[in-house]
Image: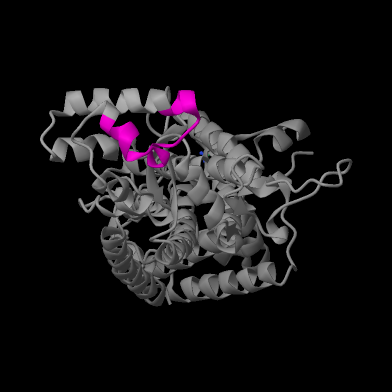
Amino acid sequence: MKEKKLWGGRFTKSTDSFTDHFHSSIGFDARMYKQDILGSVAHADMLGKQGIIPEKDSKLIQKTLKEILKDIEAGKVTFNEKAEDIHMNIESLLIERTGDVGKRLHTGRSRNDQVALDIRMYLKEQIIDIEKLITDLMEVLNKIAEKHTSTILPGYTHLQNAQPVTLAHHYLAYVEMFKRDYARLCDTYKRTNVMPLGSGALATTTYPLDRVYVMEKLGFAGITLDSMDGVSDRDFVIELLSTLSIIMMHLSRFCEEIILWSSRRYAFLELDDAYSTGSSIMPQKKNPDMAELIRGKTGRVYGHLMAMLTTMKGLPLAYNKDMQEDKEGVFDAVDTLKMCLPVFTKMIETATVNKKNMYSAAKEGFMNATDAADWLVKKGLPFRDAHEVIGKLVLYCIENNKALEDLSLEEYKKASDIFTEEIYSAISLETCVNSRTVDGGPSEEYTKRLVDINKQYISDIKEEQKKLTEEKK
Ligand code: ARG
Protein backbone atom coordinates (compact mmCIF):
# COMPACT_ATOMS: atom_id res chain seq x y z
CA MET A 1 0.00 0.00 0.00
CA LYS A 2 1.17 3.52 -0.76
CA GLU A 3 2.04 5.40 2.41
CA LYS A 4 0.85 9.01 2.64
CA LYS A 5 3.19 11.92 1.91
CA LEU A 6 2.16 15.57 2.03
CA TRP A 7 3.17 15.74 -1.65
CA GLY A 8 1.95 12.24 -2.52
CA GLY A 9 -0.95 13.05 -4.90
CA ARG A 10 0.77 12.35 -8.22
CA PHE A 11 2.61 9.25 -6.99
CA THR A 12 1.35 5.70 -7.30
CA LYS A 13 4.17 4.06 -5.33
CA SER A 14 5.87 4.81 -2.02
CA THR A 15 9.45 6.01 -1.94
CA ASP A 16 12.07 3.40 -1.27
CA SER A 17 12.81 3.38 2.45
CA PHE A 18 16.47 3.97 1.75
CA THR A 19 15.48 6.96 -0.39
CA ASP A 20 13.57 8.34 2.58
CA HIS A 21 16.67 8.00 4.68
CA PHE A 22 18.94 9.44 2.00
CA HIS A 23 17.06 12.63 1.27
CA SER A 24 15.68 13.29 4.71
CA SER A 25 17.12 16.33 6.48
CA ILE A 26 15.23 16.09 9.75
CA GLY A 27 18.35 14.69 11.41
CA PHE A 28 19.98 18.09 11.15
CA ASP A 29 17.29 20.68 10.33
CA ALA A 30 15.24 19.80 13.43
CA ARG A 31 17.21 22.48 15.24
CA MET A 32 15.25 25.10 13.24
CA TYR A 33 11.94 24.02 14.80
CA LYS A 34 11.41 27.35 16.56
CA GLN A 35 12.12 29.44 13.47
CA ASP A 36 9.91 27.18 11.37
CA ILE A 37 7.02 27.55 13.79
CA LEU A 38 7.39 31.32 14.25
CA GLY A 39 7.60 31.72 10.47
CA SER A 40 4.43 29.65 10.06
CA VAL A 41 2.61 31.61 12.77
CA ALA A 42 3.41 34.87 10.95
CA HIS A 43 2.37 33.37 7.62
CA ALA A 44 -0.92 32.05 9.05
CA ASP A 45 -1.62 35.39 10.70
CA MET A 46 -1.10 37.19 7.40
CA LEU A 47 -3.25 34.68 5.49
CA GLY A 48 -6.10 35.37 7.92
CA LYS A 49 -5.65 39.14 7.86
CA GLN A 50 -5.69 39.14 4.04
CA GLY A 51 -8.81 36.97 3.95
CA ILE A 52 -6.91 34.24 2.09
CA ILE A 53 -8.01 31.72 4.71
CA PRO A 54 -10.82 32.17 7.26
CA GLU A 55 -9.80 34.25 10.31
CA LYS A 56 -10.88 31.51 12.68
CA ASP A 57 -8.76 28.91 10.89
CA SER A 58 -5.81 31.24 11.05
CA LYS A 59 -6.35 31.65 14.80
CA LEU A 60 -6.57 27.89 15.38
CA ILE A 61 -3.47 27.26 13.28
CA GLN A 62 -1.50 29.86 15.22
CA LYS A 63 -2.66 28.54 18.57
CA THR A 64 -1.87 24.94 17.68
CA LEU A 65 1.55 25.83 16.28
CA LYS A 66 2.41 27.50 19.58
CA GLU A 67 1.28 24.39 21.43
CA ILE A 68 3.48 22.27 19.19
CA LEU A 69 6.39 24.58 20.00
CA LYS A 70 5.80 24.08 23.74
CA ASP A 71 5.58 20.31 23.29
CA ILE A 72 8.80 20.19 21.32
CA GLU A 73 10.54 22.20 24.01
CA ALA A 74 9.15 19.90 26.68
CA GLY A 75 10.65 16.94 24.80
CA LYS A 76 7.22 15.51 23.99
CA VAL A 77 7.65 15.32 20.23
CA THR A 78 9.59 12.76 18.20
CA PHE A 79 10.24 13.74 14.63
CA ASN A 80 9.73 11.28 11.83
CA GLU A 81 12.30 10.65 9.11
CA LYS A 82 9.56 9.73 6.67
CA ALA A 83 8.22 13.28 6.94
CA GLU A 84 11.55 14.36 5.43
CA ASP A 85 12.35 17.67 7.05
CA ILE A 86 11.41 20.01 9.87
CA HIS A 87 8.90 21.87 7.70
CA MET A 88 6.83 18.82 6.86
CA ASN A 89 7.21 17.32 10.31
CA ILE A 90 5.63 20.36 11.84
CA GLU A 91 2.98 20.68 9.17
CA SER A 92 2.08 17.00 9.67
CA LEU A 93 1.81 17.52 13.43
CA LEU A 94 -0.43 20.52 12.80
CA ILE A 95 -2.68 18.53 10.49
CA GLU A 96 -2.75 15.65 12.97
CA ARG A 97 -4.00 18.06 15.63
CA THR A 98 -6.35 20.29 13.60
CA GLY A 99 -7.43 18.13 10.66
CA ASP A 100 -8.58 20.04 7.58
CA VAL A 101 -7.87 23.43 9.13
CA GLY A 102 -4.13 22.70 9.32
CA LYS A 103 -4.13 21.80 5.64
CA ARG A 104 -4.70 25.50 4.87
CA LEU A 105 -1.39 26.67 6.35
CA HIS A 106 0.74 26.00 3.27
CA THR A 107 -1.44 28.25 1.06
CA GLY A 108 0.73 30.59 -1.02
CA ARG A 109 3.92 29.12 0.35
CA SER A 110 6.53 26.60 -0.75
CA ARG A 111 9.15 24.81 1.27
CA ASN A 112 11.63 26.66 -0.90
CA ASP A 113 10.81 30.05 0.56
CA GLN A 114 10.05 28.47 3.92
CA VAL A 115 13.51 26.96 4.29
CA ALA A 116 15.12 30.18 3.05
CA LEU A 117 13.23 32.01 5.80
CA ASP A 118 14.06 29.51 8.54
CA ILE A 119 17.76 29.45 7.90
CA ARG A 120 17.97 33.24 7.80
CA MET A 121 16.09 33.48 11.10
CA TYR A 122 18.29 30.82 12.65
CA LEU A 123 21.57 32.35 11.49
CA LYS A 124 20.54 35.83 12.60
CA GLU A 125 20.36 34.54 16.17
CA GLN A 126 23.65 32.71 15.83
CA ILE A 127 25.41 35.80 14.49
CA ILE A 128 24.27 37.81 17.51
CA ASP A 129 25.52 35.08 19.86
CA ILE A 130 28.91 35.03 18.16
CA GLU A 131 29.10 38.82 18.21
CA LYS A 132 28.68 38.70 21.99
CA LEU A 133 31.35 36.03 22.38
CA ILE A 134 33.83 37.99 20.32
CA THR A 135 33.05 41.10 22.36
CA ASP A 136 33.88 39.19 25.56
CA LEU A 137 37.18 38.17 24.03
CA MET A 138 38.05 41.72 22.98
CA GLU A 139 37.20 42.97 26.44
CA VAL A 140 39.48 40.41 28.13
CA LEU A 141 42.35 41.14 25.75
CA ASN A 142 41.99 44.87 26.25
CA LYS A 143 42.03 44.41 30.03
CA ILE A 144 45.20 42.31 29.91
CA ALA A 145 46.76 44.88 27.58
CA GLU A 146 45.93 47.65 30.02
CA LYS A 147 47.96 45.86 32.71
CA HIS A 148 50.90 45.26 30.41
CA THR A 149 51.65 48.52 28.63
CA SER A 150 55.19 48.34 30.02
CA THR A 151 55.73 44.58 29.84
CA ILE A 152 58.49 44.27 27.27
CA LEU A 153 58.80 41.21 25.08
CA PRO A 154 60.54 40.42 21.81
CA GLY A 155 58.80 41.38 18.60
CA TYR A 156 59.61 39.02 15.74
CA THR A 157 59.75 39.05 11.99
CA HIS A 158 60.44 35.71 10.30
CA LEU A 159 60.23 34.43 13.91
CA GLN A 160 63.68 36.00 14.37
CA ASN A 161 64.19 38.57 17.07
CA ALA A 162 63.42 41.94 15.52
CA GLN A 163 62.54 44.86 17.80
CA PRO A 164 61.22 45.00 21.35
CA VAL A 165 57.50 45.58 21.79
CA THR A 166 55.14 45.19 24.74
CA LEU A 167 52.58 42.58 25.59
CA ALA A 168 49.95 45.31 25.30
CA HIS A 169 51.08 46.11 21.76
CA HIS A 170 50.95 42.41 20.86
CA TYR A 171 47.49 41.72 22.32
CA LEU A 172 46.08 44.95 20.95
CA ALA A 173 47.06 43.74 17.48
CA TYR A 174 44.61 40.88 18.00
CA VAL A 175 41.94 43.25 19.27
CA GLU A 176 42.24 45.07 15.92
CA MET A 177 41.72 41.76 14.07
CA PHE A 178 38.68 40.92 16.16
CA LYS A 179 37.27 44.41 15.63
CA ARG A 180 37.37 43.77 11.90
CA ASP A 181 35.80 40.34 12.44
CA TYR A 182 33.07 41.99 14.44
CA ALA A 183 32.40 44.45 11.63
CA ARG A 184 32.24 41.55 9.18
CA LEU A 185 29.69 39.78 11.38
CA CYS A 186 27.54 42.93 11.48
CA ASP A 187 27.78 43.20 7.74
CA THR A 188 26.81 39.56 7.24
CA TYR A 189 23.89 40.12 9.60
CA LYS A 190 22.61 42.94 7.39
CA ARG A 191 22.45 40.73 4.33
CA THR A 192 20.93 37.86 6.31
CA ASN A 193 18.27 40.16 7.71
CA VAL A 194 16.11 40.10 4.56
CA MET A 195 12.79 38.25 4.45
CA PRO A 196 12.26 35.77 1.56
CA LEU A 197 8.80 34.39 2.38
CA GLY A 198 6.32 35.09 -0.40
CA SER A 199 8.82 34.01 -3.05
CA GLY A 200 6.87 30.74 -3.24
CA ALA A 201 8.54 27.92 -5.12
CA LEU A 202 10.24 30.48 -7.37
CA ALA A 203 7.63 32.78 -8.92
CA THR A 204 5.61 34.04 -5.93
CA THR A 205 1.89 33.28 -5.93
CA THR A 206 -1.46 34.55 -7.08
CA TYR A 207 -2.76 35.11 -3.53
CA PRO A 208 -2.64 38.71 -2.27
CA LEU A 209 0.13 38.11 0.29
CA ASP A 210 1.28 40.97 2.50
CA ARG A 211 4.99 40.32 2.62
CA VAL A 212 5.84 43.51 4.47
CA TYR A 213 3.48 42.52 7.28
CA VAL A 214 5.27 39.18 7.66
CA MET A 215 8.63 40.94 7.46
CA GLU A 216 7.71 43.31 10.29
CA LYS A 217 6.17 40.59 12.38
CA LEU A 218 9.33 38.51 12.16
CA GLY A 219 11.65 41.44 12.81
CA PHE A 220 13.37 41.62 9.42
CA ALA A 221 14.73 44.85 7.98
CA GLY A 222 13.51 44.27 4.43
CA ILE A 223 12.10 41.77 1.93
CA THR A 224 13.89 39.99 -0.91
CA LEU A 225 13.14 41.83 -4.17
CA ASP A 226 13.22 39.03 -6.70
CA SER A 227 11.52 35.74 -5.89
CA MET A 228 13.94 33.61 -7.91
CA ASP A 229 16.81 35.11 -5.98
CA GLY A 230 14.80 34.87 -2.77
CA VAL A 231 14.69 31.07 -2.92
CA SER A 232 18.07 30.39 -4.46
CA ASP A 233 20.35 32.79 -2.64
CA ARG A 234 22.71 31.21 -0.12
CA ASP A 235 25.28 34.01 -0.27
CA PHE A 236 24.60 34.84 3.35
CA VAL A 237 25.56 31.28 4.36
CA ILE A 238 28.78 31.52 2.38
CA GLU A 239 29.46 34.97 3.75
CA LEU A 240 28.97 33.79 7.30
CA LEU A 241 31.23 30.78 6.69
CA SER A 242 33.85 33.11 5.31
CA THR A 243 33.56 35.46 8.28
CA LEU A 244 33.77 32.50 10.67
CA SER A 245 36.78 31.14 8.79
CA ILE A 246 38.58 34.44 9.19
CA ILE A 247 37.81 34.48 12.92
CA MET A 248 39.16 30.93 13.22
CA MET A 249 42.27 31.95 11.28
CA HIS A 250 42.88 34.74 13.81
CA LEU A 251 42.26 32.43 16.76
CA SER A 252 44.54 29.85 15.20
CA ARG A 253 47.44 32.30 14.79
CA PHE A 254 47.01 33.36 18.37
CA CYS A 255 46.87 29.70 19.48
CA GLU A 256 50.08 29.00 17.63
CA GLU A 257 51.75 31.77 19.65
CA ILE A 258 50.29 30.50 22.90
CA ILE A 259 51.62 27.03 22.12
CA LEU A 260 55.09 28.45 21.44
CA TRP A 261 54.97 30.82 24.39
CA SER A 262 54.02 28.09 26.82
CA SER A 263 56.85 25.83 25.64
CA ARG A 264 59.95 25.48 27.78
CA ARG A 265 62.09 27.43 25.25
CA TYR A 266 59.96 30.57 25.46
CA ALA A 267 58.23 30.19 28.82
CA PHE A 268 56.44 33.54 28.37
CA LEU A 269 53.08 32.18 29.50
CA GLU A 270 51.91 29.50 31.86
CA LEU A 271 48.46 28.19 31.06
CA ASP A 272 46.12 27.59 33.94
CA ASP A 273 45.66 23.94 34.92
CA ALA A 274 41.99 24.26 34.02
CA TYR A 275 42.96 24.93 30.39
CA SER A 276 45.74 22.39 29.89
CA THR A 277 46.05 18.63 30.00
CA GLY A 278 48.59 16.01 30.99
CA SER A 279 50.16 13.08 29.23
CA SER A 280 49.13 9.48 29.85
CA ILE A 281 52.76 8.37 29.89
CA MET A 282 54.99 11.38 30.70
CA PRO A 283 54.24 12.53 34.23
CA GLN A 284 55.93 15.92 33.82
CA LYS A 285 53.81 17.06 30.88
CA LYS A 286 51.44 19.99 30.74
CA ASN A 287 50.11 20.35 27.24
CA PRO A 288 48.31 23.29 25.61
CA ASP A 289 45.61 21.02 24.18
CA MET A 290 42.88 23.66 24.07
CA ALA A 291 45.02 25.95 21.94
CA GLU A 292 45.96 23.04 19.67
CA LEU A 293 42.37 21.95 19.33
CA ILE A 294 41.22 25.43 18.36
CA ARG A 295 44.05 25.59 15.82
CA GLY A 296 42.97 22.16 14.58
CA LYS A 297 39.28 23.00 14.34
CA THR A 298 40.11 25.88 12.02
CA GLY A 299 40.48 23.26 9.28
CA ARG A 300 36.92 22.03 9.53
CA VAL A 301 35.48 25.54 9.36
CA TYR A 302 37.53 26.31 6.22
CA GLY A 303 36.29 22.98 4.86
CA HIS A 304 32.66 23.99 5.28
CA LEU A 305 33.32 27.23 3.41
CA MET A 306 34.91 25.35 0.50
CA ALA A 307 32.12 22.78 0.50
CA MET A 308 29.42 25.44 0.27
CA LEU A 309 31.17 27.46 -2.42
CA THR A 310 31.51 24.25 -4.42
CA THR A 311 27.93 23.12 -3.83
CA MET A 312 26.60 26.42 -5.16
CA LYS A 313 28.91 26.94 -8.10
CA GLY A 314 26.97 25.08 -10.77
CA LEU A 315 23.37 25.49 -9.66
CA PRO A 316 20.92 26.86 -12.20
CA LEU A 317 18.14 29.06 -10.84
CA ALA A 318 16.12 28.62 -8.74
CA TYR A 319 15.90 26.06 -5.89
CA ASN A 320 17.77 22.77 -6.25
CA LYS A 321 17.90 20.02 -3.68
CA ASP A 322 21.68 20.42 -3.57
CA MET A 323 20.97 23.44 -1.41
CA GLN A 324 19.82 21.23 1.44
CA GLU A 325 23.57 20.67 1.88
CA ASP A 326 23.87 24.23 3.19
CA LYS A 327 22.88 23.36 6.73
CA GLU A 328 25.19 20.79 8.29
CA GLY A 329 28.31 22.73 7.42
CA VAL A 330 27.15 26.11 8.63
CA PHE A 331 25.59 24.58 11.76
CA ASP A 332 28.84 22.83 12.55
CA ALA A 333 30.83 26.00 11.89
CA VAL A 334 28.56 28.01 14.19
CA ASP A 335 28.78 25.31 16.90
CA THR A 336 32.56 25.22 16.54
CA LEU A 337 32.90 28.99 16.98
CA LYS A 338 30.54 28.93 19.93
CA MET A 339 32.85 26.46 21.64
CA CYS A 340 36.21 27.87 20.56
CA LEU A 341 35.58 31.51 21.41
CA PRO A 342 34.67 31.08 25.10
CA VAL A 343 37.39 28.46 25.67
CA PHE A 344 39.96 30.76 24.12
CA THR A 345 38.77 33.73 26.16
CA LYS A 346 39.01 31.81 29.43
CA MET A 347 42.35 30.29 28.50
CA ILE A 348 43.95 33.66 27.79
CA GLU A 349 42.28 35.33 30.75
CA THR A 350 43.63 32.77 33.22
CA ALA A 351 47.14 32.38 31.78
CA THR A 352 50.02 33.70 33.90
CA VAL A 353 52.36 36.14 32.19
CA ASN A 354 56.05 35.62 32.92
CA LYS A 355 57.36 39.18 32.57
CA LYS A 356 60.91 38.24 33.56
CA ASN A 357 61.29 35.69 30.79
CA MET A 358 59.76 38.05 28.26
CA TYR A 359 62.21 40.76 29.28
CA SER A 360 65.29 38.57 29.20
CA ALA A 361 64.27 37.19 25.81
CA ALA A 362 63.96 40.76 24.56
CA LYS A 363 67.53 41.41 25.65
CA GLU A 364 68.79 38.66 23.36
CA GLY A 365 69.38 38.95 19.65
CA PHE A 366 70.37 42.62 19.34
CA MET A 367 66.82 43.91 19.22
CA ASN A 368 68.13 47.39 19.98
CA ALA A 369 70.39 47.48 16.91
CA THR A 370 67.97 49.64 14.90
CA ASP A 371 67.84 52.10 17.77
CA ALA A 372 71.64 52.22 18.00
CA ALA A 373 71.77 53.04 14.28
CA ASP A 374 69.00 55.63 14.67
CA TRP A 375 70.99 57.29 17.48
CA LEU A 376 73.96 57.74 15.12
CA VAL A 377 71.62 59.16 12.49
CA LYS A 378 70.32 61.68 15.00
CA LYS A 379 73.96 62.68 15.54
CA GLY A 380 74.31 63.42 11.84
CA LEU A 381 75.49 60.17 10.23
CA PRO A 382 73.58 59.08 7.09
CA PHE A 383 71.40 56.01 7.82
CA ARG A 384 73.28 53.64 5.48
CA ASP A 385 76.60 54.48 7.19
CA ALA A 386 75.04 54.09 10.62
CA HIS A 387 73.64 50.69 9.55
CA GLU A 388 77.17 49.64 8.52
CA VAL A 389 78.77 50.82 11.81
CA ILE A 390 76.21 48.99 13.96
CA GLY A 391 76.34 45.91 11.72
CA LYS A 392 80.09 45.68 12.37
CA LEU A 393 79.55 46.19 16.10
CA VAL A 394 76.96 43.39 16.12
CA LEU A 395 79.46 41.09 14.44
CA TYR A 396 82.07 42.08 17.05
CA CYS A 397 79.53 41.32 19.79
CA ILE A 398 78.72 37.91 18.32
CA GLU A 399 82.42 37.04 18.18
CA ASN A 400 82.92 38.19 21.77
CA ASN A 401 79.64 36.89 23.15
CA LYS A 402 78.37 40.29 24.25
CA ALA A 403 75.26 42.41 23.86
CA LEU A 404 75.42 45.96 22.45
CA GLU A 405 74.74 47.41 25.90
CA ASP A 406 77.68 45.41 27.35
CA LEU A 407 80.27 47.16 25.17
CA SER A 408 82.59 49.71 26.80
CA LEU A 409 82.72 53.25 25.50
CA GLU A 410 86.24 52.53 24.13
CA GLU A 411 84.88 49.64 22.14
CA TYR A 412 82.16 51.93 20.78
CA LYS A 413 84.65 54.68 19.99
CA LYS A 414 86.74 52.23 17.97
CA ALA A 415 83.77 51.77 15.67
CA SER A 416 82.94 55.49 15.44
CA ASP A 417 84.13 58.54 17.36
CA ILE A 418 80.60 59.93 17.37
CA PHE A 419 79.66 57.63 20.30
CA THR A 420 79.22 59.14 23.79
CA GLU A 421 77.81 57.85 27.11
CA GLU A 422 74.38 58.77 25.79
CA ILE A 423 74.32 55.62 23.67
CA TYR A 424 73.56 53.45 26.72
CA SER A 425 70.28 55.09 27.59
CA ALA A 426 69.40 55.40 23.90
CA ILE A 427 69.50 51.64 23.44
CA SER A 428 67.85 50.48 26.64
CA LEU A 429 64.80 48.35 25.89
CA GLU A 430 62.59 50.88 27.65
CA THR A 431 63.84 53.68 25.38
CA CYS A 432 63.47 51.50 22.30
CA VAL A 433 59.83 50.88 23.14
CA ASN A 434 58.81 54.23 24.57
CA SER A 435 60.42 56.51 22.05
CA ARG A 436 58.25 54.93 19.39
CA THR A 437 55.45 57.36 20.09
CA VAL A 438 54.17 57.28 16.52
CA ASP A 439 50.46 56.37 16.36
CA GLY A 440 50.17 52.60 16.14
CA GLY A 441 53.44 51.97 17.95
CA PRO A 442 54.44 50.16 21.16
CA SER A 443 55.04 53.19 23.41
CA GLU A 444 53.26 53.16 26.72
CA GLU A 445 51.83 56.58 25.94
CA TYR A 446 50.20 55.39 22.71
CA THR A 447 49.04 51.92 23.84
CA LYS A 448 47.30 53.49 26.84
CA ARG A 449 45.41 55.71 24.41
CA LEU A 450 44.51 52.69 22.28
CA VAL A 451 43.25 50.81 25.34
CA ASP A 452 40.92 53.77 26.01
CA ILE A 453 39.74 53.87 22.40
CA ASN A 454 38.95 50.16 22.67
CA LYS A 455 37.07 50.62 25.93
CA GLN A 456 34.81 53.16 24.25
CA TYR A 457 34.38 50.88 21.22
CA ILE A 458 33.47 47.89 23.41
CA SER A 459 30.95 49.87 25.42
CA ASP A 460 29.37 51.19 22.19
CA ILE A 461 28.95 47.75 20.64
CA LYS A 462 27.59 46.34 23.88
CA GLU A 463 24.99 49.09 23.84
CA GLU A 464 24.02 48.14 20.27
CA GLN A 465 23.76 44.48 21.25
CA LYS A 466 21.52 45.35 24.16
CA LYS A 467 19.21 47.32 21.87
CA LEU A 468 19.09 44.46 19.38
CA THR A 469 18.22 41.94 22.08
CA GLU A 470 15.52 44.25 23.50
CA GLU A 471 14.03 44.82 20.04
CA LYS A 472 13.68 41.06 19.63
CA LYS A 473 11.60 40.72 22.81
N1 ARG B 1 14.73 20.20 3.32
C1 ARG B 1 14.79 21.09 2.23
C2 ARG B 1 16.07 21.91 2.30
O1 ARG B 1 16.68 21.91 3.31
C3 ARG B 1 13.63 22.00 2.24
C4 ARG B 1 13.23 22.54 0.90
C5 ARG B 1 12.73 21.43 0.08
N2 ARG B 1 12.19 21.88 -1.18
C6 ARG B 1 12.01 21.06 -2.16
N3 ARG B 1 11.55 21.57 -3.25
N4 ARG B 1 12.30 19.78 -2.06
O2 ARG B 1 16.48 22.54 1.37
Question: Which quarter of the rendered picture does the N terminus lie within?
Answer: top right
Indicate left or right for 39 with 331 as reference.
Answer: left
Q: Nearer the viewer, residue 64 or 118?
A: 118
Q: Nearer the viewer, residue 457 or 444?
A: 444
Q: Nearer the viewer, residue 422 or 209?
A: 422
Write the start and end of the magenta stretch as one range: 397-413
Q: Nearer the viewer, residue 275 or 442?
A: 442
Q: Residue furthest left?
A: 380
Indicate left or right for 384 with 203 as reference.
Answer: left
Relative to 191, residue 410 above or below: above
- Here the colouring is one colour
Q: Is residue 443 visible?
A: yes
* Residue depicted at x 68% and y 63%: 96
Coordinates of residue 161 in the picture (x, y in percent):
44, 35
Please identify the dominant SS of the magenta region.
Answer: helix
Relative to 352, residue 337 above or below: above
* Residue depicted at x 52% and y 39%: 326
Coordinates of residue 462 in the picture (x, y in percent):
37, 71
Coordinates of residue 311 in the picture (x, y in percent):
49, 28
Question: Which quarter of the rendered picture does the C terminus lie within?
Answer: bottom left
Reply yes or no: does residue 353 show up in magenta: no
